[in-house]
Amino acid sequence: MKFETDYEVDFSNRDPAGGTDELFYKRWSPRSFKKVEIAKEVLESIFDAARWSPSCYNEQPWLLVTSSGDGDMETFLDLLVEGNRAWAKNASLIGFIFSKKRFTHNDRPNDWASFDCGSAWLSIALQASLYGLYAHGMAGIKKDEVCKRLNVPGEDYDVICGFALGVIDCPQRLDADMAKREVPSQRKPLSEVWRHGVTG
């Protein structure tokens, strides 16, 4: 199954290297969503992709908590800062990623947990894109309130980010200032982020 949209994203300003699959360079974090129902089996597939992400000692330190569609959307929206709440209200689902602070096997601090949660997040975003869905990660959250409101023990978990998931909509549905920014961003040249060999 693939979700359809009337809005076609223009990725022509992106310059992938030859051979880079479009799964990667067409991943984008839009703010304009239209609310649709996403079947449970689709959501299971998206979050199961995160389950297969690599992690240090196979700890799988991520915990994913998402809105259920059973009247709890307002609780999740209320945990976003106002600017994010304004557009995320049109997404199909809001979620948060938590990172377990300590290893299960020896109870020592897991200094790689956040890195591993990043792998899980990318898996979510890419699997969602295979369904024609878009995911937008958010740092603009009420971090001090998230654990308590979602019944996650703060002594055991750190809040990594929030995210919205849904079908993309045309930018004109956003306010004018936000709509102007609704364009896939460019990336730094590969030469700035990849050093091949030892250099002075």
Image (spheres, rainbow, N blue to C red):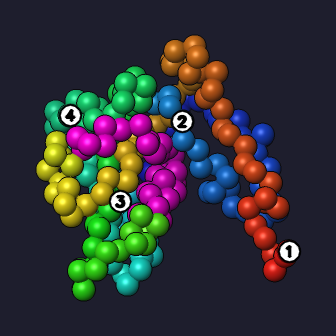
Residue that carries the numbered disc 1 in the rendered image: 200
In the rendering, at what x and y percent does residue 194 appear? Answer: 76, 67
**Separation (CA) of disc 1 from disc 4:** 52 Å
Q: Amino acid at mark 4?
A: Thr
92 to the left or right of 34: left
With respect to residue 182, does 188 lie above or below? below
Q: Amino acid at mark 3?
A: Phe
Q: Residue drawn 31% across and 37% down?
A: 142
Mark 2–mark 3 CB contact (< 8 Å): no
59 to the left or right of 67: right
Mark 1: which secondary structure?
loop
Residue that carries the numbered disc 3 in the rendered image: 47
In the rendering, at what x and y percent does residue 184 appear? Answer: 66, 38
- Of tags 3 and 1, the one toward the viewer is 1
User: Dot 3, how many residues are within 10 Å of its Cα: few (below 14), some (14-19), or many (20+)?
Assistant: some
Magenta residue check for 142 = yes
What's drawn in magenta, residue-wise? 117-146
Mark found first going from the N terminus, 4 or 3? 3
Name the main secondary structure of what is drawn in magenta: helix
Residue 30 numbered tag: 2
Residue that carries the numbered disc 4 in the rendered image: 75
183 to the left or right of 95: right
In the rendering, at what x and y percent does residue 116 appear? Answer: 43, 69
Q: 181 or 26, which is in the foreground?
A: 181
Mark 2: which secondary structure?
loop
Mark found first going from the N terminus, 1 or 4? 4
**Separation (CA) of disc 1 from disc 2:** 39 Å
Q: Amino acid at mark 2?
A: Pro
Mark found first going from the N terminus, 4 or 2? 2
Quarter of the picture containing the C terminus is: bottom right
